[in-house]
Amino acid sequence: MANVAGIPVYKEMGATPGPGSALDRVRVAIVGAGPVGLALALDLGRRGHPVTVLNRLDFVAHCSKAICFSKRSLDILDRLGIGDAVVEKGVTWNVGKVFRGAGEDPVYRFDMLPVKDQKRPGFVNVQQYYIEEYLLDGCRALPNVDIRWGHAVDAVTPQGDGVELAVTAEGGGYRLQAEWVVACDGARSTVRDRLGLDFEGRVFEDNFLIADIRMKHEMPAERWFWFDPPFNPGRSALMHKQPDDVWRLDFQLGWNIDREVATRPENVETFIRAMLGEGIEFEREWYSVYTFQCRRMARFVHGRVVFAGDAAHLVSPFGARGCNGGFADADNLGWKLDLVLNGNADESLIETYNHEAVATADENILNSTRSTDFLTPKSSASQALRDAVLELAKDHAFARPFVNSGRLSTAVAYADSPLSTPDEDAWDGGVAPGMPVLDAPFGNGWLLDELGDGFVLLACGETHDPLPDMRLVALEPGSLAAQRLGLTAGAAVLVRPDQYVAARWRRPTPAAISAALRRAKGEIQCQH
Amino acid sequence: MPALTLTPNLGGHDDLYEALVRLHDGLSDEQSLRLWSRLALILMNHIGDRDVLFAAMEAARRS
């Protein structure tokens, strides 16, 4: 199966034999062994659940897909135990620069880590196949995670208390009955298709050329973006550094082009040489032309079938909100499924995944759509406004924040989450319910590493009665961690297993903490 | 909250009107549209009040 439709192979896994019976039963089936499916498998696996992952292909693909992993994703990967491997391999960066025309001074500059003294940087660039490899290493260390390579889902039949999948595998097909199915099977999700579900949104009329090349080149580890550069007049370009001397070049091509002609090496290399100089020596890694869409399913939870990642929502790549958005899904779903599978929360908790993941997708789609409208103006007025911003940005600081070459992925706030207990005390700053805890030095390490996989009460200078399923972590009054959370002596914050703040108090009572914990597990429904 | 001012708030209307017309002398429609855009952005930033700006956009669109 290794030579599927021209997909290059990073690592052969070999087809996994079928289960040997016509009917197999599992608790959780994850469809798709991409980064989102594997992250969820690793999370559930680490929590002790038996997990079965079905992947249509029997290899890890080599082609370039996601490369930019946000701080929030690194925090998630840290919790899953592979953060160090990713950061060690990857190219760390915080700063993005936007250039216009032949100008050598950026018209706009941004820093993705405005608050320093955190464990992880704003971004790390690393090829998706490395992420998949590290996630696989984590999964394979767990006997309860079963990854089946070359197992394709053909049919999906919802049942009262589960789902039945018809699966094709080497040596014959079988039926797989699962209590829960999580579809992480990408933009062209088979599960979504077989269930006949919607996937609404906008297609953008523009083509972009990706050239991943290998070369020796000196440039700071930053994201560089050009509007109207001499090597692609009237259009845009983007440059990212990846590990192994690989560079991602991205050229806007416009709408009416012949995509086959555009990816011919001689045509791609004309762009590359115009950008980097005639004498440049490089090797081709991967050339392709892509278009993009912003769309999402109306709902991500359909009975016992849950959708995550590209299967549920698609955005443009400008902003690195695709794979990072998918990790946010896996992170949000993991602890909720864990509680439901263990009988520690009602099934309705999964509905809050729908609420929060849809909010995340909407923010990502909004940002992505706005960036796209700046990159590819749709009317002469829109074009004039965009050009006016770029003209003004050269001379006037006020215009620079309007420059939109992609608003890069950061943690999304769950503004009106049913799991959050609204503030009753007055707060000046800190981290409000529905936002993830801001990292800070803690002891000899970092606060986020201290949070673990469960509920935590971060208590500042005061002890509290322990509750079942909730750890206590004491913060020193006046410490940077306490300051960043806005905590004075006696105050406390309840943190969810995904590091999001569920509630906070100046002077919590045991009853208030207990109620907030129950609400965060979906036991108390509040009105919105 | 300061509301959008839609009553006369300036003197020398004819001077300002003429200056606005003259600003476009010798420009193509395309250049003119960019100029309007730059002017709008500069004024928006100077006003610096989102509520006033959204009210102004609505008033401009409604007329």
Image: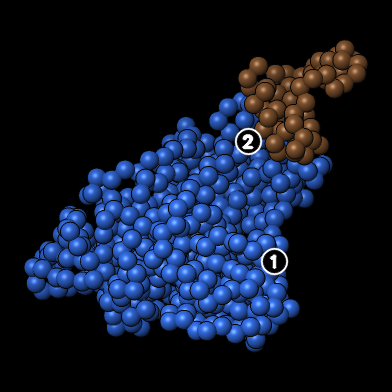
A160 left or right, relative to A61: left
Chain colored blue: A
Q: Nearer the viewer, residue A72 or A506?
A: A506
Q: Is residue A159 above or below residue A395?
A: below
Q: In the image, residue A512 lies at what x, y percent?
A: 52, 71
**Residue A453 rendering spot, x and y as whole percentages:** 46, 77
Between residue A411 and residue A293, name the one nearer to us.
Answer: A411
Residue A281 seen in render: no
Above or below, A70 relative to B46: below
Q: Are marks 1 and 2 in contact (CB under 8 Å)?
A: no
- Element under label 1? loop
Q: Earlier in the sequence, mark 1 or mark 2?
A: 1
Q: Which residue is rendered at x = 38% and y = 40% of the image?
A: A200
Name the secondary structure under disc 2.
loop
Q: Nearer the viewer, residue A484 or A13?
A: A484
Q: Amino acid at mark 1?
A: Val
> Crowdedness of circle 1 by 10 Å Cα count: few (<14), some, many (20+)?
few
Residue situated furthest left in the rendering: A22
Query: What residue does disc 2 label?
Result: A234
